[in-house]
Amino acid sequence: MPIRIDHVGIACTDVARSLEFYSRLLAGTAEQRAGHLVITAGALRLALVPRETAATRTDRGQHLALRTSLEERPLLLERLRELGAPWEDVRGRLYTQDPDGFVLEFLFD
């Protein structure tokens, strides 16, 4: 499956403080995207999610977002079913958890 990292989500207790830290550390730029403040530095994108927001959405603050082609979606869903992994479709994105509860987000082109 051709796949790449789209972004890493970080749950923050103070988004402004995290913005200052990561944008200065990585010499990145910030923009609002899909309801998150996203810092871009080179090919890296960090989504800063307020911790209280993350807690109200099944704790999606800490997550790894992976991007693949739309053709892979049915195959991915089949593998998730075979694994018995819970998943949720949110606006065309799939969210699941690994066996330890770490959240994975799949986006499709």
Image (cartoon, rainbow, N blue to C red):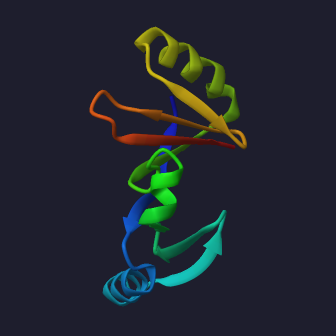
Depth check: give the residue in front, 87 or 8. 87
Q: Height in image: 67 above or below 47?
A: above
The location of residue 70, given as percent across then percent down, is 69, 33
The location of residue 52, given as percent across then percent down, is 46, 63
Horizontal relation, residue 81 to residue 72: left or right: left
Residue drawn at 48 percent across, 44 percent down: 58
Which of the 4 image quarters holds residue 12?
A: bottom left
Depth check: give the residue in front, 93 or 35. 35
Which of the 4 image quarters holds residue 34?
A: bottom right
Q: Residue furthest top?
A: 82
Q: Residue furthest right?
A: 91
Quadrant where the image shows the C terminus: top right
Q: Height in image: 30 above or below 103?
A: below
Q: Height in image: 5 above or below 86?
A: below
Which of the 4 image quarters holds residue 44?
A: bottom left
Q: Height in image: 13 above or below 19?
A: above
Residue drawn at 48 percent across, 33 percent down: 96
Residue drawn at 59 percent across, 32 percent down: 88
The location of residue 57, given as percent across then percent down, is 53, 49
Q: Residue furthest left?
A: 100
The location of residue 55, given as percent across then percent down, is 45, 54
Total count of labels: 0
Horizontal relation, residue 48 to residue 98: left or right: right
